[in-house]
């Protein structure tokens, strides 16, 4: 197999390079709804218990299919 690879060299002007690497100290988020910020849902013990309870039948099914029981 032949592999001819050319390295890509991008030439850019000094002013454009300076604009690209300048650090911006602000972030503008236009798609965030501020009204819902106070209503955060916590992940509780009941949620973890529900996930574990739902996983047990899936694991049991996987093992029975694997061993042909």
Image: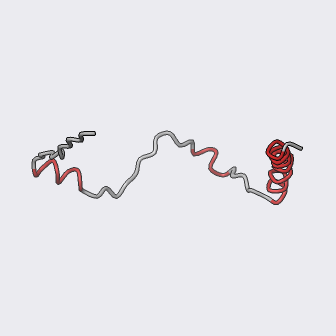
Q: How far across and down, in percent of the image, does residue 3 sit? A: 24, 41
Residue 33 screen position, x and y as percent: 57, 42
Q: Hey, which residue is sitting farthest front in the picture? A: 1
Is residue 4 rendered to the left or right of residue 43?
A: left
The number of callouts visible is: 0
Which sits in the foreground, 52 or 7?
A: 7
Name the spot of residue 31 as percent of width and height, x first: 50, 39
22 vs 5, nearest the viewer: 5
Q: Residue at position x 74%, y 56% from top?
A: 43
- Residue 34 shown left or right of residue 41 in the figure: left
Counting from the top left corner in percent of width and height, residue 22 is at: 24, 56
Image quarter hosting the C terminus: top right
Q: Quadrant for the N terminus, please.
A: top left
Q: Is residue 10 left or right of residue 68?
A: left
Between 19 and 58, which is closer to the camera in this rendering?
Answer: 58
Q: Looking at the image, which residue is at 40% across and 51% down?
A: 27
**Residue 58: which quarter of the image?**
top right
Nearer-the-camera pick, 53 or 48: 53
Q: Quadrant of residue 8?
A: top left
Give the colouring mode of the picture. Answer: secondary structure
């Amino acid at each position: 197999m032949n592999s001819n690879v050319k390295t890509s060299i991008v030439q850019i002007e000094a002013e454009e390079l300076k604009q690209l690497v300048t650090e911006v100290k602000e972030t503008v988020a236009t798609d965030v709804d501020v009204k819902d910020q106070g209503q955060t849902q916590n992940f509780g013990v009941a949620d973890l218990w529900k996930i574990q309870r739902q996983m047990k039948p899936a694991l049991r099914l996987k093992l029975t299919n694997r061993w042909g029981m």
